[in-house]
Image (tube, rainbow, N blue to C red):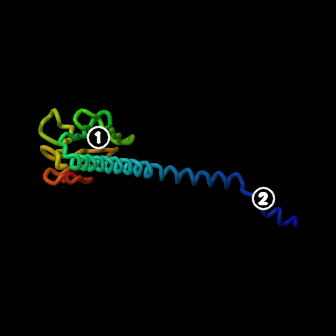
Amino acid sequence: MKRMINCHQGFSLIELTTTMAIVAILLMLAAPTYHNHLHEKRLESAAVQIASDIRHVQQLALATESPSYQIRFYLNNGYYQTVLGTKVLNTGYVPNGVKISYVYFNNDSSYRHTLRINARGLPTPIGGHILLSSGDKIKYVIVASVTGRVRVSDKLE
């Protein structure tokens, strides 16, 4: 019986310190990868949400046959608003670490950061794109001029 007790005394301080050092090194190696992955997922999520909101506004314009729907993007503040006439219907925010870097929807500089939707659910006068960035990663939300198709892409094509 005494022999069994002596065999199970536990771990030495050196063994515990070595194990903790190995775990710390592995965490230090994994942290940047996790951080980059988190930025990519936030960026993807923001782009998909904006595309979804644009599609929703297109559906509202079709359903109500109203040419007064707009989505206004505020680059420096990190949010956008869905507007009907002068009434703000919804405000969307991009996640921390994601920036609305560039918005272009038409040639009129006073409405450059505004997507206007006509009664048929199409962008008016032309489509355009939104550039989102997070670190060194970028995503585009593209609205086609002729069809009004909304898509998310890594490239502006």
Q: Which residue is mark 2?
A: 9
Classify mark 2: residues with Cα within 10 Å, few (<14), some (14-19) or many (20+).
few
Q: Are marks 1 and 2 in contact (CB under 8 Å)?
A: no
Task: Answer yes or no: is residue 126 visible.
Answer: yes
Between the residue at mark 1 and the residue at mark 2, the CA separation in whole angstroms equals 59 Å
Label 2: state its secondary structure. loop
Of the residues shown, which amino acid type is indicated by label 2? Answer: Gln
Residue 140 visible here: no
The image's mark for residue 29 is none
Question: Where in the figure is residue 49, as x and y percent of width and height?
Answer: 33, 48
Depicted 3 relative to depicted 67: above or below? below
Q: Residue sitting at 31 percent across and 48 percent down? A: 47
**Quadrant, the N terminus:** bottom right
Q: Measured along the vertical axis of the image, is residue 103 above or below residue 154?
A: above
**For this view, does 122 lie left or right of residue 89?**
left
- Corner quadrant of residue 108: top left
Q: Position of residue 13 (x, y in %)?
A: 70, 51
Q: On the image, numbered disc 1 is attached to which residue?
A: 100
Measuring 20% from the left and 54% from the top, which residue is drawn there? 149
Front position in the image: 127 or 59? 59
Name the residue type under label 1.
Ile
**In front here: 29 or 43?**
43
Q: Nearer the viewer, mark 1 or mark 2?
A: 1
Residue 121 at what x, y percent from top left? Answer: 19, 49
Image point (34%, 51%), residue name: 44
Residue 106: percent from left, percent from top: 14, 41
Under circle 1, the secondary element is: strand
Which sits earlier in the primary sequence, circle 1 or circle 2?
2
